[in-house]
Amino acid sequence: MSYMEDVKPAVSSFKKRFALAIIPLALTLASCTKVHSQQVVRAESTGHNQPDYLNTALPLDSRVNALVESMTLEEKVAQMYNDAPAITRLGVPAYDYWNEALHGVARAGEATVFPQAIGLAAMWDRAFLNQVATVISDEGRAKHHEFKQDGLSYRYTGLTYWSPNINIFRDPRWGRGQETYGEDPYLTGELGVSFITGLQGNDDKYLKTAATAKHFAVHNGPEISRHSDNYVVSDKDLYETYLPAFEKAVTEANVEAVMCAYNRVNDAPACGSDMLLKEILRGKYGFDGHVMSDCGAIADFYDPKAHNVTASPAAAAAWAVTSGTDLNCGTGRLSSFANLIFAVQKGFIDESLIDQAVSRLFKTRFKLGMFDPDEDVPFASIPSESVGSESHLSKALQAAEKSLVMLKNNGILPLKKGLKVAVIGPNADNPDVLVGNYNGLPVNPVTALEGIRNYAGVDNVAFSAGSALIADVYGHWQVLDNTVLYHNDKDGRLVPGAQAEYFEVTQGKMSDFSRPHFPVEMSGGPVSSEVLDSLSFRKTHSPVTNKIAEDYGMVLKAVLIPEKSGEYRFDGAGEISIEGRRINGSVELEAGVSYDLEIRHIFSVNTIANTAYSHLRDWQMRWVNVSTDLLAESESVAQQADVIVMAVGISPRIEGEEMPVKLDGFNYGDRSRIDLPAEQQALIKALHKIGKPVVVVNFSGSAMALNWEDEHADAIIQAFYPGEAAGTALAKILWGEVNPSGRLPVTFYKNLDGFAEFDDYSMANRTYRYFEGEVLYPFGHGLGYSEIQYSDLKTPANLNSGSDLEITVSLQNMGPYDAEQVTQLYVQMPDAPAGTPRISLKGFTRTFLENQTKASVSLTVPASELTYINDKGSRVAYKGKLNIFAGDGQPGYVDGTRIAQASININ
């Protein structure tokens, strides 16, 4: 804090004058992002020589230095925004660093959507996760070059992906835990390495894409206070839990970028922490890539409602860059780094640090081949046809199959063919629960209901939503289609479908801050029109200009004839009018009555946010009849079935990142309780009374306290958010075509008893490594249709300290089904002089076993894992008795033939 104490007095008197001056400066610089061309144009020159930075024969560092040295201070500072403007005189195109690829290319139109990250973790499969990331980077490259060809450089068109999230899911209340690989630092680190290497590729010269390890560090909720919280952690917890995955990302995967977090860590903002960014990241780990702030994190330094640890934007910017933050994601508050020009003038920061940051940023762009001919870059030729290809969708199905975790089965599963099935629950036909957050638009989404109907036949499957998700949040919205929408054809006849007309739009002014999108109204007559069979479309080009990312307006008219009377609500973008009356909220409609429906909507570029493409492609309008007695309907449906499959849980609409959601058990994206919402508990209990077998399928991004369900349901499957192939994978598992093989990457607790406050970052009594209470389902838990027995664990009797541990264990599939078995290796260090976790995962692997066959599995624990962290945060080689367990889960939760164990001495 001493640096900021020095500069704070110098800037405090300037605060009012500077705050007013920086707005037009930042807006002027931000407006440069309207230069869209991604092509490297010829730099202005008095001669005919090629600029050195374009000379591919020169070493990389020489090229970067040549470019940075030719920039003015103003140009360099502008390149430190996430939406870096073009430098026309040097031939440098505009570029936005912000892109996402958490479980598929996100926010850039259609892409193959894999299970949410927590579901990918449930696969416990390094090799397959690497394949998933390879598919994602294939599609990312294909999209980037298609955008480049069309002259687009908006957000979500680049190759710098702000994924993966390798924070530790230490508390089940965290809404963003779904984005992580779970609660264990070893599992998270191993999976992070696999994902990062899949994104970045294995070329000796070029990066395929640039991955980002986030959020560095000590960041896992609460969401509502993340901009102001100061998390105090011990050195032991820091190095034992919060940092190991980041260390592996840097030292083993050579991750290209790191994102610093919003919160403070031991008093210093993470994006201004010398301890984190200088001493640990670049010092101990040897990181040589670039660091970007989380979006708006630098403004939190001086925001009175956030950290408020310095007086002005200039001081905050200087602080962050001096500590090692190279790129400012500014979003709606624009860029705090715009103030660096003033900071240099006033001596808050030396220009050499600006040069260092800009060099790091351009080095990434050079490594991605952005300043080289496409023919030299091996990934530039990946075709756009690879996006959502058959082979990629097949990978999504495999991932979903591997990720589903069977928590309980009393023998009801697998189901017999020919059964009448009632599919009931608010998530049965809810597409939201397929994709989680940070997602693309799925190519072929299959809900649980659709998958079961496809597998068992429509005549054998009945459906009812049964209840809302919670309160007035529904999961069974339906797209309006030509079963209720009509229009008059040219002969005046009423025929199915809605008439859509598309218009040009007028442009608003940059100074009109009252409007988030500058295009404000439609003009002239319709340029084109079409009849829509359903109110859902994805357009790659404007129907007005036939260009990508062009603004346009739509006026849709139809005659709406509901099939059932009731109170209806609508969900979708646009201004809805019925019989000329603007609809806000719900509206009463009668079955068989004709209503004039009009929807007006402008599809527009958000210039400040620098986004366009993803917003212009996808549109739909859904509705739901909220007056239906869903419980009575579900009871009637269940009475006619042989078995009830209940699709329950929560959804990414009520758990996630800093959300405006305040409901019973939900708090601005986080959760305050971990059981099912009361509506769904009542539904499950009511249907259980009918006496039919009940299979519960829970969709959630976090652990659920399914206590009553565990006691009374016949089977339970944890689906997480399983990607676009969810329904197909679920059906194949329910009927035994696929043997379930997923394992929990988090602990499912019975309740929150014994938990410290959410913002207490001590690891005491958190996660399986430290929790002292009884749990519902332990970390690593998962059942299959075959019993797998473990035996003959072979280890050395003694091991020298500093040596790797090699073990083998025998597996036997005793059942009638082929199986993919996850073998888990845990250790205990009872002789450590400092407190250690009660047990720690140190190895895992997947093995395919045909039914009634044996196999031998070998695992190696590197010497670096046979260590403990002392109270000072130092890693110490362990000596003494080492207890080793290899089997189907944690010792104490699996026993007998499902686990093998041994003890050795480390000298």
Image: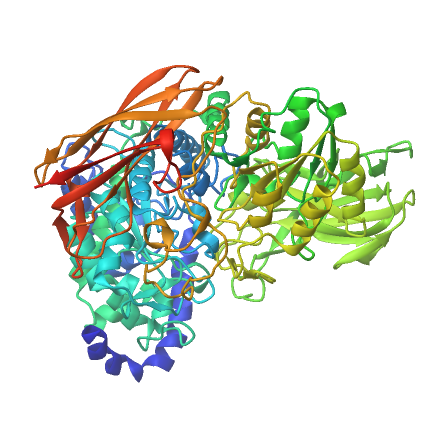
Front residue of 600 and 433: 433
- The percent coordinates of residue 589 (x first, y second) are 86, 51
Residue 759 to residue 861: above or below: below
Q: Quadrant of the C terminus?
A: top left
Q: Residue at x 49, y 59 (%)?
A: 658
Front residue of 418 and 56: 418
- The percent coordinates of residue 700 (x first, y second) are 53, 46
Residue 55 to residue 75: above or below: above
- Is there any visible trace of residue 895 in the rendered image? yes
- Is there any visible trace of residue 155 in the rendered image? no
Q: Quadrant of residue 336?
A: bottom left
Relative horizontal placement of residue 361, taking residue 757 as reference (left or right):
left
Q: Quadrant of residue 781?
A: top left
Relative horizontal placement of residue 218, taking residue 701 as reference (left or right):
left
Relative horizontal placement of residue 286, taking residue 594 as reference (left or right):
left
Front residue of 74 and 385: 385
Q: Residue at x 49, y 23 (%)?
A: 394
Q: Residue at x 39, y 73 (%)?
A: 303
Q: Residue furthest front?
A: 896
Residue 858 to residue 577: above or below: above
Q: How many numbered badges does the structure rendering display?
A: 0
- The percent coordinates of residue 184 (x first, y second) are 33, 46
